[in-house]
Amino acid sequence: MQQFIDFIIRKKNVLVYFLLLSFSLSLIFKTNFFQNSKIIVFSNSTANYFNEVFNNLNGYFNLKRVNSELANENLFLKNQLENLINKKQLDSLDNAIFKYQNAKVISNSLSSFKNYLIIDKGLKHGLENEMGIISSKGIVGIINYTTKNYSSVMSVLNIDTKINAKVKRTSHFGTLEWDGLSGENLLLNDIPETAEIKVGDSIITGGMSLIFPEGINIGVVSEIIKQKKRNDTTANFVINNQVKIAKIQFKENYLNIVVKLHTDMNNLNIVYVIESLNKEEFKNIKK
Amino acid sequence: MASTFLIVFKRFIFLILLQVLIFNKFDLFGIYDPYICLVFILTFPVKTSKISFMVVAFAFGFTLDLFSNSLGLNTTACLTVAFLRSYIMSFIFGGFFDPLGLKLIKNYVSDSSFSQKILYVSSIILIHHFILFSLEAFSLKHVSTVMHKTLITYLLSGFFCTTLIYIMIGNEK
């Protein structure tokens, strides 16, 4: 017993270290798996408050830029509306599938591998998980957690984000991912080599889910990297009543496409939340 | 003792504000931020006991996490660096290091050689960044990305931390 107590006194630094370490590691895993633990809610609400105050001050310096951006967007939308009215009369029976809401970004991280934005609308305004967020120039992210007044948005600059996208000119579908090393480029994978992609092609959302409607701008192709991927499959052959297993190799070449984002993730201020009105129906049919 | 407490408390507030309000929005090339908060660990008074140092570093990391929406990451990294600091110091400064803490950080800055200073700052920053980024990515798939980012952020943090230490140390008592 005496020796045990001696041991504890001798090793007290190490013991305290491991005690604190286990506590901090449990914090990390709680954040990853149980988003609604009490600590998170508390930390989010305090930090959000400070961020909002600071952002309000900071916002004045951006007013000029935001104003001109909004005016440009207004002009673009007005032109579109004009075309639409000329083409056909607006019909109120034509049901809209998506509804838009605006929100303000109050904090925006860029420097980690899993970047999140916080926006100033939450459950109170009808926001839910898995709603898409876009800016006036292109996509921004997907809502992953909401509280009463705030929502956290998984940015496209997050190594876990996977977004369905297609090349506008050739209609080839692929998956958009982030490699974690550049603030303005994403990677578009899974596009076969036979697709004739050129530098400068536009990339838009694919519309395979109800998060983003089809045809929202993402970016332009800035570089094409060829990548060889070897697929190994096994096949069974029956020779002389004996089953033999053979390995078949076939090569399939895919392109890794570097996409330069339209959205400037450094300067986000006003964003739009996309709410799908047919979500329930879509879920029911998917069951 | 009271003055040590006051110095630590002042640095705590000052460095958290500096990191959260200015350096977290630095964003070189879009995504690289220097971690100037490490100055807190690098210049923590040597004469305080190791347990209180670890508890304070834990609180420091936790406060930092509250503001950057990354609960636990900075806490783990700061705590581990605080735990390892005495070993690193005795390894690098050798006989010059005294665990009783009669020497101030000022003495270490003025009396050690250039390579010792560089080694001390680099080893602490590299260990901190490596732990932080690998916990953040948390998969073997991204090992090369983690290394890449650790190196670039290390260069940034190293430059800013060294500069700030030289500014601060002039008026240490």
Image (spheres, coloured by chain):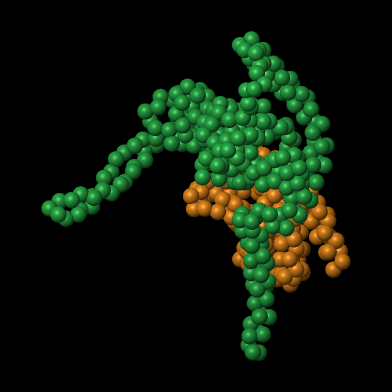
In front: A228, or B9? A228
Q: Position of residue A196 (x, y in %)?
A: 40, 24
Q: How many marks?
A: 0
Q: Is residue B101 left or right of residue B154?
A: right
Q: Nearer the viewer, residue A143 or B120?
A: A143
Residue at image position (59%, 55%) is: B135
Chain B shown in which color?
A: orange
Residue at the image position 63 percent from the left and 14 percent from the top? A84
Q: Position of residue A154 (x, y in %)?
A: 63, 42
Quadrant the C terminus of chain B occupies: bottom right
Farthest residue, direction bottom? A2
* Location of residue B149 with respect to A273 vertically, above or below: below
Question: Is residue A212 something that shows in the picture?
Answer: yes
- Where residue A6 sits, quadrant-wise, is bottom right
Residue A7 position by quadrant: bottom right
Instruction: Name the spot of residue A38 as percent of width and height, x first.
Output: 73, 58
Residue furthest out toward the top:
A86
> Residue drawn at (55%, 54%), measured in percent from left and top?
B138
Q: Quadrant of the N terminus of chain B?
A: bottom right
Residue at the extreme front of the image, as rendered: A93
Q: In the picture provided, is A188 more to the left or to the right than B172?
A: left
Furthest-left residue in view? A240
Residue B78 in sight here? no
Which residue does the image show at 36% across and 35% down from the upper left? A253
Query: In the rendered image, what is the letter of the chain coloured green?
Result: A
